Image (cartoon, grey):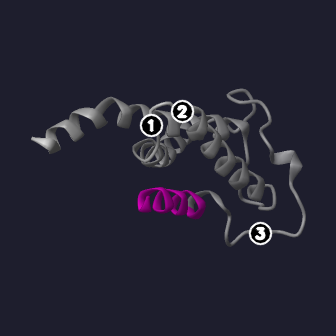
């Protein structure tokens, strides 16, 4: 369970604009449509997937096999929270693309753990 806390902390450090908060929102910078509204860069999408994969992996390792909906919900909640804080920063661009990529990253991590967890646990018993 420490991995869940650690993954969440890394995500919050990475996506919350800790030094750039302003006292007014920047709604004009929000990318409302996933994979349509700019800025749209492949490296940013990949970075978001990689950033959230450990969260999904740690949640999958610590949950029942049918927990993909819960994993997606946790990732979406954390992502939307972080993206919302970016509305109050001059240098950040909150977007629905980031939210989708983040949830996909968590699900990729979960799928990888589910795929390899049983063989790992079975090997540990021998």
Q: Nearer the viewer, residue 9 or 113?
A: 113
Mark in front: 3 vs 2: 2
**Which residue sits at x=66%, y=61%?**
16
Crowding at dot 1, Cα within 10 Å, few <14 / some 14-19 / many 20+, comes out as many
Q: Residues at badges 1 and 2 in contact (C-beta under 8 Å)?
A: yes
The residue furthest top is: 36
Q: Residue furthest bottom?
A: 19
- Depth order, front residue of 82/121: 121
Marks 3/2 in contact by CB < 8 Å: the verdict is no
Q: Mark 1 points at which residue?
A: 110
Q: In which quarter of the image is residue 92?
A: bottom right
Numbered mark located on residue 21 in the image: 3
Q: From the viewer's perspective, is the residue at label 3 or at label 1 nearer?
A: 1
What distance separates the C-alpha of mark 3 from that of mark 2? 33 Å
- Residue 76 location, x and y as percent? 66, 42
- Residue 45 lies, with reference to residue 89, above or below; the image says above
User: What residue sits right under mark 2 in the picture?
Assistant: 68
Total marks drawn?
3
Position in image of residue 103 (x %, y %):
59, 37
Point out residue 19 in the picture as x, y percentages from the top left corner.
68, 72
Verify whether residue 111 appears in magenta. Answer: no
Span of residues in magenta: 1-13
Quick check: 44 left or right of 88? left
């Amino acid at each position: 369970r420490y991995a869940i806390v650690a993954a969440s902390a890394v995500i919050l450090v990475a996506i919350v604009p800790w030094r750039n908060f302003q006292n007014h929102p920047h709604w004009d910078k929000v990318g409302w449509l996933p994979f349509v509204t700019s800025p749209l860069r492949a490296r940013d999408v990949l970075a978001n997937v990689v950033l959230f994969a450990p969260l999904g992996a740690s949640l999958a390792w610590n949950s029942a096999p049918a927990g993909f909906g819960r994993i997606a919900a946790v990732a979406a909640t954390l992502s939307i929270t972080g993206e919302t804080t970016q509305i109050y920063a001059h240098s950040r661009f909150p977007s629905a693309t980031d939210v989708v990529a983040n949830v996909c990253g968590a699900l990729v991590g979960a799928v990888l753990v589910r795929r390899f967890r049983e063989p790992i646990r079975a090997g540990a018993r021998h």
